[in-house]
Amino acid sequence: MSGVAIVGGGWAGIACAVELAGAGRLVTLFEAAKHLGGRARGVDWNGIRIDNGQHLLIGAYGETLRLLRRLGTDSLLERRPFELRAPGFRLALPSLPAPLHLAAGLLLARGLNFTEKWAAARFMRDLKASNFSLPEDIPTSLLLRQHRQPAALIAKLWAPICIAALNTPVEIASAQVFCNVLRDSLAGSRADSDLLMNRADLGRLLGDAALAFLGQRARLAEKVNGLTRTETGFQLAGPEQAAEQVVLAVHPGRLPGLLADLPEMAAISNSVAGYTWQPILTLWLRFATPTVFPFPLLALSDGHAPWAFERNDLAPGLVAIVMSADGPHLTWPVERLRDDYLALLARALGPLPALRDWKIITEKRATWTCTPNLPRPDNATPLPGLYLAGDYTRGDYPATLEGAVVSGIKCARLILKNNP
Ligand SMILES: Cc1cc2nc3c(=O)[nH]c(=O)nc-3n(C[C@H](O)[C@H](O)[C@H](O)COP(=O)(O)OP(=O)(O)OC[C@H]3O[C@@H](n4cnc5c(N)ncnc54)[C@H](O)[C@@H]3O)c2cc1C
């Protein structure tokens, strides 16, 4: 009997495994790929390692920061006070205690007129008065209309935050989840609103360190094909392993397949089978010499915009341009996409060094579409001993690293509590 089996070595599964192993429990982490990290991992590219997709963390990611501290890699994050820069627009939150940082930031924001600044302040004040809790979940665009937010303010501030955080366009994004994000970022403490940029590839940030911590307890390239009940727990098909408790920490799109032989899980399986997905595209550019950014993260236009990240940490001259969510850009020929984004980057930075290499990575099912009232399963399931971890399980956050890590920790704590 193998104690706890965790299926899936993304950030949720890793967080769960590290927490349980740290508490002295017998734990085995099964990962189908040859590496840990799932949707946030390192990828080899012509002699350097990049991220599968550019990520951004914020100071409010408390459990993620605790996990990285435990593994000794939190120093690979660069912390900057919140700043949103786009052509003709800048909102920077100064180093003042909350809520003064937001008030001062809005007052001094560039590219917003007085009416727009006042509308933003009023919106945040009204949300705070209702504890960022809505009477019913609605599309974010409707919430913004109800609060009479001017179109220019939506295009410059709210839409970029919504698309970046929820990876879902404002027209269909959950207003409640959007409010949760605002509560913990702009309206949180100053430190919570800080932006954290990984200054090493995502594999170094988590996957490699987790592998070193877990050692033989992490079994790579071992896909679990299914799950059946036994008298004492579960049997995993594939590794042919028995376990008393199982944590399924897979992408929600993989969940129904793994639950096929467990009729008690049919309701959860069916509701997750109704999810739809949003892509994220990252264009990696390698210039002959380093580029100089006024801030390491720049929105290249208003609204649904690509964002550019300076990534000289990975290799001198590296830039990542990331485009969230669905959109016409996905149908463009790759050369057009590269040239359009290069032109936007040149508009922001001035003349660019010679381009030596480029690569596009599109994660088609990067995140689940974060729509109003989406059913999200609990971490505990109707089957004793079976738990669900992953960014889609019940929680305040959209599909994020923090949502994934929190879910993994919650599963570990449930197991420790239920099996003292
Ligand atoms: C391009 C991109 C950009 C993003 N940007 C951000 C960002 O800026 N900020 C942010 O917070 N979040 C961002 N996200 C979201 C974030 O990466 C995810 O929410 C998070 O990584 C999900 O982790 P997870 O552990 O829940 O799932 P996953 O990462 O999907 O992990 C599941 C793991 O299970 C494994 N697996 C699946 N089936 C099996 C099986 N049968 N047997 C064994 N193993 C199996 C998979 O190989 C995978 O490793 C981004 C995502 C992408 C793709």
Image (spheres, grey):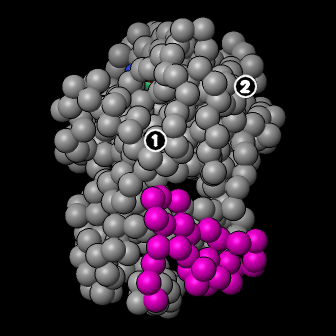
Which residue reaches farthest front?
351
- Mark 1 belongs to which amino acid? Leu
Query: Can I make out residue 103 in this image?
Result: yes
420 relative position to 375: left or right: right
Point 33% across, 31% down: residue: 339
Please tell me whether mark 2 sits on a helix, a strand or a loop: helix
The residue closer to the viewer here, 353 or 99, is: 353
Q: Secondary structure at mark 1?
A: helix
Residue 165 in sight: no
- Expressed as whole percent of the image width and height from the top left, the position of residue 107 reads 58, 84
Q: Quadrant of the N terminus?
A: top right
Residue drawn at (65%, 29%), measured in percent from left and top?
290
Question: Dot 1, crowdedness within 10 Å: few (<14), some or many (≥20)?
Answer: many
Residue at numbered disc 1 = 345
Q: Is mark 1 within 8 Å of ligand 1?
A: no
How far apart in space, not on screen, are marks 2 and 1 (Cα)?
34 Å
Q: Is residue 67 above or below residue 42?
A: below
Answer yes or no: disc 2 within 8 Å of ligand 1. no
Around disc 2, counting alpha carbons within 10 Å, would you say few (fewer than 14), some (14 to 19), or many (20 or more)?
A: some
Q: In the rendering, at what x and y percent does residue 196 appear?
A: 66, 49
- Taking depth in this image into account, of 197 and 348 the one nearest to the observer is 348
Relative to residue 159, is residue 360 depicted above or below?
Answer: above
Query: Which residue is label 2 attached to?
Result: 209
Rendered position, 23 above or below 82 = above
**Magenta stretch, residue numbers:** 85-114
Rendered image quadrant of residue 126: bottom left
